[in-house]
Each structure stands twice: as C-alpha cells, then as structure tokens.
Image (tube, helix red, strand yellow):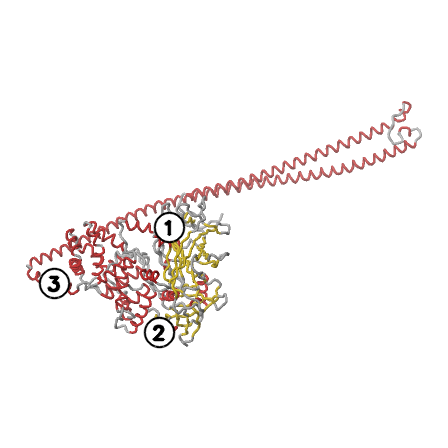
Amino acid sequence: MEELPDLRGASPTAEEEESVLFNKLTYLGCTKVTSPRKEGEALRAMAELRTSCQIPIHITLYVPNVADGCVRIIDQATNVEIAAFPIYTVLFCVRGIDGTAESNYFAFTESYGCTDEFQLHVFCCEIKEAVSRILYSFSTAFRRTSKQTAEVKYMSDASPESDSYNFTVSLEVKEDDGKGNFSAVPKDRDKLYFKLRQGIEKKLIINVQQTSNSELAIERCFGMLLSPGTNVRNSDMHLLDMESMGKSADGKFYVITGAWNPNGPAFQALNEETPKDVRVYMTVAVDLVITEVVEPVRFQLETVVRVYSANERFWYFSRKTFTEVFHLKLKQSEGRSHTGSADTMYEVVSLQKQSERDGTAPPATGFMLYLGRQASVTLSPQDDEEEKDSDSELSSGTGDVSKDCPEKILESWGDLLQRWHSNLTTRPKGLPVLVRRGVPEALRAEVWQLLSGCHDNQAMLEKYRILITKDSVQENVITRDINRTFPAHDYFKDTDGDGQDSLFKICKAYSVHDEDIGYCQGQSFLAAVLLLHEQLPELYNHFVDLNLEAHMYASQWFLTLFTAKFPLCMVFHIIDLLLFEGLSVIFNVALALLKTSKEDLLQADFEGALKFFRVQLPKRYRAEENARRLMEQACNIKVPTKKLKKYEKEYQTMREQQAQQEDPIDRYKRENRRLQEASLRLEQENDDLAHELVTSKIALRNDLDQIEDKADVLNKELLQTKQKLVETEDEKRRQEEESAQIKEVFRRELEKAESEVKKTSAIISEYKQICSQLSTRLEKQQAASKEELELVKGKVLSCERCCKLFRKDGELQVPEPGQSCTLQHVDEEKELLKKQLREMELELAQTKLQLVEAKCKIQELEHHRGALLNEIQATRNSWFSKTLNSIKTATSTQPPPPPLPKEST
C-alpha cells in the first residue's frame, strides 16, 4: 500500500504552525504566463517544464491555512527557502489531466511582485492521490470554518457585530451569431428560461451590484464556474476561461465575462436538444475576492434553460436577464488586517438568496471553491422524483461520494493522523467520535488501512502478489459475479476494464487465502430476529403475522454488508464503523433502518413489505444528509451484546440437548433429507447448466449455419462477379479492337482529306497568283490605254481640223455633219478600246468567281474534317462510357471481390 505525503504542521515558527506541510514533492521551476487564469495555457506550460526540467528539486511545501499566511517552498537537501509569497497573490490552481504524463502534477499562478507579470509554479507529487489534498489545502485560506445552520442563524440574529450587505447579481448568456459577434440569447416569455442552441460557442456575463450599506471593494474574480443541474456539489463545477473582469463604464456594476464551449463532455446535458416538457437546470457561480472580507465569496445562480437545435430561429426575443438578490452578513474579524493596513477586516457569517428566504428555491451553499476536475451531469429534480416513484431497484454502486469536507474536521483528522503515525500500536484518543461522523473521502484509503492494521504492511502486499498468481477453484464463480458487482459505478461497469480486473484479483486472492470461511452466515439471522424481538416488538409481531422472516429482507444486508443496494455514501460510512467497531455494527444499522421505516412497514402487507425493502428503502438514502442521520441513529442504538451472547449460548445448549435427545434414526433421516435436498439442488443446477449449454450450442450451431449460408451466398455472388468481370474484360477487348479499326479508317480518311485540302490549297494559291497577275496586267493595260488616249487627244488638239472635236475643258463635242467622215476613224479606235476593256473586266469577273468557288470548297472540306473528328471522339466516348457503366452495374449490386492482380489496358 502506498503512503500519502506527510500532513502535519510541526515547525518551531508561528508562521509554520499555521501551515500544512507537504513532503515527497519535487519542484520543476516557474515560468511566466500572460493569462494567469486560463487552464489551457497553464497545462501547456506544465508540459513544457516537465520535458525541459533536467534536475528537479526535492522540496517541502508549506501551504497556509489562514488568509494572511505565506506559501513557502523549502529545499529539503539544504533547508534553504527557495521562494515565499503571500497566499492572497495566488490567482489560480490547476492539476494535470488524468491519463496524461502530468496526472500527478499540479501548479498555481501568482502575481509577480508589484508588476502586471504572472508566474506559474509547477510541482510533481510522488503519490497521485495526494494532489487533491494539496489543492484542498490551498483553498483553506479562502474558506470560512464550516458552521452548522443553527449556529449561523444564531450568530446572524444575535451578534451585534454583524452587518448586512445586499447584492443584486444578474446573468446574461450570449451566443456566437456567425458574424464574429456574440448576441444575447432570448428568454421564454412565460416560463422565463434561456433558449440555447446546440454546439454554438457562448459567453456568460455576470453583473454584480451592491445595493445597501457601505460599499465593499471587489478586488478580483477568483473564478467563474458552470455545471448542469441544481444543488450541484463543488466537485461537479467546471472552471471556465474568464475573458474580462472589472467595473462597468458607469462604475455601478462589477462585470465578469467567461467563455463557454458547450461541446465538452462535462456539458453534455446542456448541449442536447431538450424535450418539450422537460426542464434542464444550469448552475453558474463566481468567486469574488473582496478587499475587506477574509475569504472569497461565492454568488451561485441556478436558472432553467432549454436547448434547441443549432439551426433554430426565434421570432420573439425577450432580453431580460436572470437576476437573484443575495443577502451577505459579515462580522468584524478580530486582530486581522489586509496586507498590513489598518482597514477593518470581516468574516462571512451567512450568505442567503432572496428566493431561499421566500421559500421558492432550495438552499444552496455559497462558499465552495474550485478544487478538482471531476465532473458529473446533474439534471433537474423532476427526473429524480420520477425515478424515486418508479418500481426499479437501485443498482449497486449507485451514488457519488462527496469529497467536500469542512476545514475544521480536516484539521482534526490531520492532528489525529499525526499522533497515530507516531504510535501505530495504539489507536489515538478522539478516534471514535471522528469515525462515527464518517471518515472524509480524501482520507479513507489511509484511515481504512490504519483501522484494519495493514498500513505499510509489505509482508501482506508480497503475500497478495503471490496469491494472485495461484489458481483458484472458484475462478468461474468469481468471473460470473464480477459483471454483476457495482454495475452502476463507472470504475466497475466496463467489461475487462481496470475495475473488474482489480476486483477479480482481490476475490481470487482471498479465495486462495481462506478456502473455508470461518463465519457462519446463519448466526447473523438468528441474532437479527432476537434483536428485532427485543428492540421493536410491535414490528416483530407484525412480521410474525405476515410470516415475514428475517432472511427474506436481511440476508443481502448481512452477506454483503449493505453494499449490494444502498448508495456508496452510506456504504462507505458503514465500512468506516465496521473497521472500527467490528461486525456488531451491522446489527446497529439494521435496527436503525427498521426503526426509521417502522411506520411504513406496519401499514404494508407481505408483498408491500418486501417491495419496500427491495426498492423504496435504498432510495431514501441517496441523499448524503439522510444517510448521515441514519448512521447517527445507528451509533446511538445500544445493542445488548451480553444478552445476545447469553441467547446464543442458550440456543447452542438447546440445540445440543435436542441433538442428544433426538433419535439417531431421526437425525440420520433429517441429515439424509438435507443431503437429498442438496443433491436435488445440485442436480437442478446441473440440469440448468446442461440446458444452458445445450441452448448455447444450438444457438451457436444456428449462428454457424447462418454464417455458412451467408458465406455460400457471398461465394456465389463472388463467382458471378468474377464471371461478369471476365465478360466485361472480353467486351473491353472487343471494343478496343473495334476502336482500333475505326481509328485506322478515320486515319485513312483524315489523310485523304488532308491531301485534298493540300491540293485545294495549291489550286487556291494558283488562282490567287493568276488573279494577281491579271490585276497587274489590267492595271498596266489601263495605264497604257490612258497614255495612248492622251497621246491621241494631244495629236487631235494639235491638228487644226480635229481640235474642234474637243472643247476647251477637254470634253468631246458632237461634230457637225460635215465632220463625220473625219471622226469615223477615231470612233473605231474608241470602240476597239472599249471592247478590250469589257473583255478584261469579264476575265477578271471569271477569275473572282473561281476564287469564291475555291473558298467555298475549302470551307466545305474544313466542315467535313471537323465532322470526322467529332465522329471519332464520339466513338471513343461511347465505347469508354459503355465499358465503365457495365463495370459499375456489375460491381454496385455485389459485395466487393477480393483484390485481383492489376492488368495493363
């Protein structure tokens, strides 16, 4: 068994006497951080220091249990103080995540001197379980001493030093609108619940306003916490990343903003779509450090929400916030000042909601700090009431065990354990009182070992290691029962998990260690009947009238020590007393159960009484307060041990006398009947096992037949698929051959078309050349004709007789009749020139027509070529698509065939 770190405050200085000392720690160093309250950044820095630290320092850590103390880090080797700083500079504590290399690490951030810089100090604990205790000790400086409700009321009413301060605290929820902004979520118009949407990032905004008495200065927010459910435990609250804190612009409110990612597993109940008539509660809390108050004050809000789908749209928007009024009572703290100043300091007397005063809300604790990372999902009390009224039995391992414990009780246990460790042979004084109140959950592992006398027993540990290696004849029975042990507990519910494996090893080791159990189970029922007759005669007579015997309801109590049906918080308390006082405590608990249920049992018939013992009675003690009251009553019951021993002796004497007086034949007959009954029972068990075996074989045979049939069907389908694949490949080859042939035909046609195009291009170029030559020739002839015409004109004008044929502007004029003979020769030449001109124009028009025809022919050839190319491409696509579609059709309706060697196509 491992030993937790030393927990004591032994030191000569007064400062160390007010501190809790922890050994078996190593200091990895410190690093600067920018966001001291962000868990993600702290965990990353913790991992970096773990990997980069070369020589960790073994240290002793002093954690003060008062608000004005100092955290001190002492080097164990040299006894030199490494660092020391006031506890009020500690801003945030965090531990490593379970299942990682940092699971036994913890760290805290503190403000560095008087600057705005922050440092993260990282430590490693040799014993993982001690991390929770160390973090709990850090919180003691910020927590008030637990007081009973009656004492608080008395102090608040009677103390003249008490002052009342009223605070109005409002909650607003905002969601990411997808545009980079956060918008307020709506509230239902009638039932005033928040309407949340699944999977969307959210922000929680809390406004705190003091409304009465002299103003208290809020220094900072120690943390914002969130949990599903109502009346949740401190261990179920989850720390959120705070984005901002400080006073509002007008100075009236202190505003805290936290970021909430609802997709985490701890917030599953707040991220699932809520049925129409179901209410889901959400608890939000802020821990505020107030300058004039010694410990942080927690304002805890509980509101109803409803979760909708992520794409839900709300048409009516009510922007009302959820508001709660808190009444804080303080009293002046004697002899305390804040950081050396002369300001008056106060202690918290009580913190109460207005709704609690009005009786509209259940009381809630206002002074809990963030101490751990364990989370549980708690839904509304409506679901709990429905489960309470149901007929379903309470599964073993049900219920969570709270790890919260008042500081005063922890201090008492710390002093007692220190004295006990110094002398393990004698139980210290004051132990009975503390055990009867219940051992704190964080200390149970250590205290149970001390009570049972196996603390640091290496010989027993070595013997256990040997026992688990041996074979046990009870292994089959143990294996069969393992799955039915604590099925409601997370640690034991997974088949072949760590919990079931550990439980199997322990049961197996004990079965090898003690083959013949020395305790007679029947004696407990005899004692129970006698106690019932003596302590509760009226109830005993009622059971006699109903023919209800003790073994019908108490067998499971005594055989399993109440662990089979009752919640764990009650079971652990019973084990506390069992280890301290012995087996007699089971009679106290049984009598306490019967006394508290007397009125219900007296009104019940036979069936009703059995149902009450089986279903309703265990559910009564799911609340820790009910279980605590029951155990107090059990401790106050005086069991007449001497009288029981006297009854036992008389009973044994009577049995011996009856055995002596009894005829041996009758005794043998009775023994024979008992053996026959045992034989019949064993035969029945054998028949049941044989029947179960045959049934299992038949079921296995049927399953095997079905699997074989399915395998045959799959084989047939596989063969069909292979056949279709072969056919497809043949079709593919045939298509490829056809495609090759078509390609060859198209290639020849294309070459022929290209040769024709070349010929046509040659003809066109020749036509173009001829046209160019003709145009040039025409232009030359026109120029020559013009020159000849001008020459003739010049000669005519130079002639005295012919000059009259032209006017002064050079135009030809009609000759007179006497001149017709003279101009005849000129007209003939003119007609000849016109004729030549017409012939040349006609020849040019023919050439142009041939050119147009050649261009048309070229266009036609180009169109024909494009059509051939399109036809080739269409043929290719058609073959490929047909092949691909046939393969898809063959494979889509069949299971995938085993992989075949790839073939080149």
Residue at far right of view: 800
Q: Quadrant of residue 120?
A: bottom left
Residue 838: percent from left, percent from top: 78, 30
Q: Nearer the viewer, mark 3 or mark 1?
A: 1
Q: Amino acid at mark 3?
A: Gln
Disc 1 + disc 2, Cβ < 8 Å: no
Local secondary structure at mark 3: helix
Q: CA distance from mark 3 to mark 2?
A: 55 Å
Q: CA distance from mark 1 to mark 2?
A: 49 Å
Local secondary structure at mark 2: loop
Q: CA distance from mark 3 to mark 1?
A: 60 Å
Q: Which residue is mark 3?
A: 652
Residue at the image point whose x is 79% and y is 31% from the top: 837
* Residue 616 position (above or below residue 855): below
* For marks 3 and 2 on the same chain, the one whose residue lies earlier in the sequence: 2
Q: Which residue is mark 1?
A: 280
Residue at far top of view: 817
Residue at the image point whose x is 50% and y is 56% from the top: 250
Q: Amino acid at mark 2?
A: Ala
